[in-house]
Amino acid sequence: MNIEELREECLKIKGAEECFPFDEDTMVFKVMGKMFAFASLMPKNSDFFVSMKCNPERSAELRERYEGITKGYYCGNNLKWNSVYLNRDVPDKLIKELIQHSVDEVIRGLSKKFQKEYLEM
């Protein structure tokens, strides 16, 4: 997957918005005003990556299984965010699944009222 395809996949998400709140090089994708993914347009060591929310248990499992999934870059030392390198060993299908998983994690964290609002979009 390349950075353009990543952007397209993120924008396919129901209610997704793209913005640049940090700088002109960092795309941020949100649903219901909450960030589910961000990616720099400037590759790190020639590698593009996206950081996404993830269930902590799944996060640990993914990091053990794939070289291309690491702790979230710029996200501190926690298991709630992963960085997924687009040109390493992570299949495109899994990247797409992880985008949706990140959105699901964001929605799960919303109040019942906002969860209902999102589901009814």
Image (tube, grey):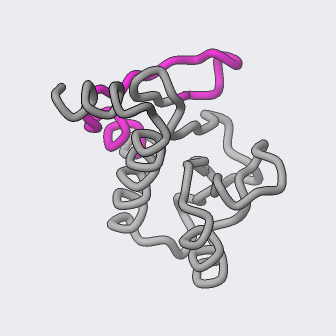
Residue 58 percent coordinates (x, y)? 54, 71
Label count reads 0
Asked if residue 95 lies left or right of residue 21, the reply is left
Q: Residue furthest left?
A: 120
Give the position of the C terminus as an image quadrant: top left
Asked if residue 115 lies left or right of residue 23, the reply is left
Give the position of the N terminus as an image quadrant: bottom left
Using the image as rendered, state which of residue 72 and residue 84 is in the foreground: 72
Q: Residue at x 71, y 53 (%)?
A: 72
| Vertical position of residue 76 compared to residue 42: above or below | below
Using the image as rendered, state which of residue 44 and residue 94 is in the foreground: 94
Residue 17 percent coordinates (x, y)? 39, 22
Which of the 4 quarters of the picture holds residue 16? top left
Which of the 4 quarters of the picture holds residue 70? bottom right
Q: Residue at x 35, y 51 (%)?
A: 100
Q: Residue at x 74, y 48 (%)?
A: 44
Using the image as rendered, state which of residue 8 and residue 63 is in the foreground: 63
Residue 62 percent coordinates (x, y)? 57, 75
Q: Is residue 98 magenta?
A: no
| Vertical position of residue 38 compared to residue 75: above or below | above
* Magenta segment boundaries in residue numbering: 6-28
| Vertical position of residue 55 compared to residue 99: above or below | below
Residue 83 percent coordinates (x, y)? 64, 55
